[in-house]
Image: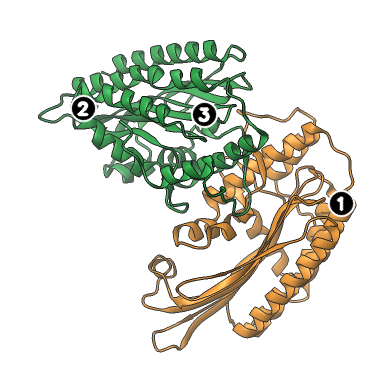
Chain colours: A orange, B green
Amino acid sequence: MKEQFVAYIKDLQNTITSKIEAIDGGATFKQDLWERPQGGGGRTRVIENGNVFEKGGVNTSEVFGELPESMQAYFGVKEANFFACGLSLVLHPLNPMVPTVHANWRYFEMYNKQGVLIDQWFGGGQDLTPYYLFEKDAKHFHQACKAACDIHDPLFYPKYKARCDEYFYNPHREEGRGIGGLFFDYCKKSTKMQIKDWYNFVTQVGDSFLDAYTPIVEKRKELQYTPEQKDWQEIRRGRYVEFNLVHDKGTLFGLKTNGRIESILMSLPPSVQWRYDHQPEPGSEEEKLITVLKNPVNWA
Amino acid sequence: MKEQFVAYIKDLQNTITSKIEAIDGGATFKQDLWERPQGGGGRTRVIENGNVFEKGGVNTSEVFGELPESMQAYFGVKEANFFACGLSLVLHPLNPMVPTVHANWRYFEMYNKQGVLIDQWFGGGQDLTPYYLFEKDAKHFHQACKAACDIHDPLFYPKYKARCDEYFYNPHREEGRGIGGLFFDYCKKSTKMQIKDWYNFVTQVGDSFLDAYTPIVEKRKELQYTPEQKDWQEIRRGRYVEFNLVHDKGTLFGLKTNGRIESILMSLPPSVQWRYDHQPEPGSEEEKLITVLKNPVNWA
C-alpha cells in the first residue's frame, strides 16, 4: 500500500504541475528536493509570479522513523514507528476573480517496535476559497467532489462536505475560510471498507481535482478587475493566513515538530493586507461573499 | 492602584497619540470606543496611511468581571473575579529604514468570590523591530530602556532585556522577531518591591517610550529607499505576523477568549509578503540584520 500510494501521489504531482504550467503559460515550477535527517524527505514544487498563478506549491513528501514524542501523545501511543506520505497543494491566483484552492491526500502507517503494522489510515480533501462568488463555480466544484464520492458511498459527500465546513472555520471571525469541498481523516479498515477501498476512494478524489478546479480558472482568468478588487483579495488572504497560522493543525504541527518550514509555509499567500475594521459595503459583491462564508450552502 | 494606573495609561495614550500625529503630519488617529458585555471596555485608536506611519494602533482597555474558565486554568485558580487594564501599541512605519515598535504596560488584580483582593501584578515592556539595522538606533533604544530600569534596580535591565529576547522569538525561523528591549511580567509585591514601587517602575518605562523611539523615527523617516528595500520590509513583516499569530500569548489568548478582534489584530502590518525560500544576499544589509536577529547583541 505504501509503495502504491507513493507512486500515485508522485504521478499525480507530475500531472498537476504540468497542467498548471500549461494554464499559466508563463512561470514554471521550481523543484526542491529535501531530506529529513530522521528518515525520508520530499519533492517541493513552487510556482511564483506567473501569468495566472501569483504563488503556489504542489508538494509531495514521504517521511518515516520513530514516532516523535509530540505525535505519541497526539495518537495516544508510545514507542512506535511510523510512515507518512502525502501530496499537499495550494494555488493563489493573481486575478481576484479566480479562487484559491487547497488540496491534500495522505496516508499514514504505524508500527510497534517489532515492526508489526498496528494501524493505517488515509486522509485528505480539497476546498475552494473564492474572493468573488460565482455560484456556477461553487456548484461545479462541489458537484465534482460529490461525483467522486458517490462512486464509493452516497453518504460520503454530505459527511465530508460538512466536516470541511467545520474544519476550515475561523471562529474569531465567525466565518469559513472558503466555500468548502471535502475533508476526511482517519479513514480506516471497517466492515464496509477495506484499506484498498479507501485507497480507491482517495485516489478517486485526487483524480477529480483538476476537473474540479481548472475549468473555473480557465473561465475567470481573463476577467477584468479593479485595484479595489485586488485589495479585497489581499484583505481576504489575510483571513487565509489567520486560519493557517492560528488554527490549521497540519501547519502548527509542522512548525512545532521541526518540519521543513519553507514547504509548510508555501501555503501562505504572496501579498496580503490587514486593514483596521474593514467592512464590505452593504449590498456589494464583497458582502455577498461574506454571507456565504458565514452560512455554508449546499452547492451540490 | 486600579484608578491610578487607569488614569496613567489614558493620559499616556493621549500623549503618545498626539506626538505620533505631530510626527506623521498627515494622518490622525481614528478612535473607537467599545464595551465588553461581561464588564469594561476600551479606547482603540488607529492610524492608517499616514506620511510616516502606514498603520498603527495605540489602545487602552479596562476589563473586569468573572475570571473566564480558560483563565482559571491558566492562573491555577477557581471561581475568581478579575480586573485588568493596559495600554498596547504597535506602529508600522511606511519607510523600511524606520523600525516597527511594540509596547505594552498592564496591571492585573484578582479577587475571591467575597471580593477580597487575592493577587495583583504589573507586566509589560517595549521592543524594536528594524528592517535595516542602524547600530546607533539600537543602542539609543536600549540605553533608554536601561536608563528607565536603572533608576529602580540595576539588575532589571539585564534581566528584562534577556526575557525580551527569549519571548519575542520565532523558533521555527530560529531568529528573534526584532532586536528586543524589555519584557517583564508577574511583577508582584516582594520584600524589596511594594506594589507602589512596581507602579513607579512600570510608569517610568511608559514615560521613557517616546524618548526611546521617536528620535529614531525623526532621524530615518526622510531616508530614500528602493522598491526592493520595501519588499524586504514586507517580507520581514511576514515574520512579525508569524510570531503574533503562532506564538504570542496575548494575541492567541485574545482570539480564543472572544476579545475585541479588531483591537487585538491592529498589531498586524498593513501589507505583507511571503516568498518561497527567500534568502538575503551574502554580505548584504539584509543579511546583517538576520545575523543580529539570530545572535542577540548587548546594545546598551
Image quarter of residue A127: bottom right
Residue type at mark 3: give it: Ser
Residue for badge 2: B116
Residue type at mark 2: give it: Val
Given the image, what chain letter belongs to the residue carrying mark 3? B
Q: Nearer the viewer, residue B255 or B221?
A: B221
Q: CA distance from mark 1 to mark 3?
A: 37 Å
The answer to whether the residues at label 1 and label 2 have Cβ atoms under 8 Å apart is no
Residue for badge 3: B263
**Residue ID at (37%, 26%):** B141
Given the image, what chain letter belongs to the residue carrying mark 2? B
Q: Quadrant of the N terminus of chain A?
A: bottom right
The answer to whether the residues at label 1 and label 3 have Cβ atoms under 8 Å apart is no
Horizontal placement of B274 versus B122: left or right?
right
**Residue ID at (47%, 52%):** B173
| Neighbours of disc 1 within 10 Å: few (<14), some (14-19), many (20+) | few
Residue type at mark 1: give it: Lys
Is residue A160 at all visible to an observer of this figure?
A: no
Return the x and y of residue B99 as percentages of the image width and height: 49, 29
Q: Quadrant of the C terminus of chain A?
A: bottom right
| Neighbours of disc 2 within 10 Å: few (<14), some (14-19), many (20+) | few
Whether labels 1 and 3 belong to a single chain: the reply is: no
Q: Nearer the viewer, residue A98 or B223?
A: B223
Horizontal placement of B107 versus A237: left or right?
left
Query: In the rendered view, would you say A298 is above or below B140?
Result: below
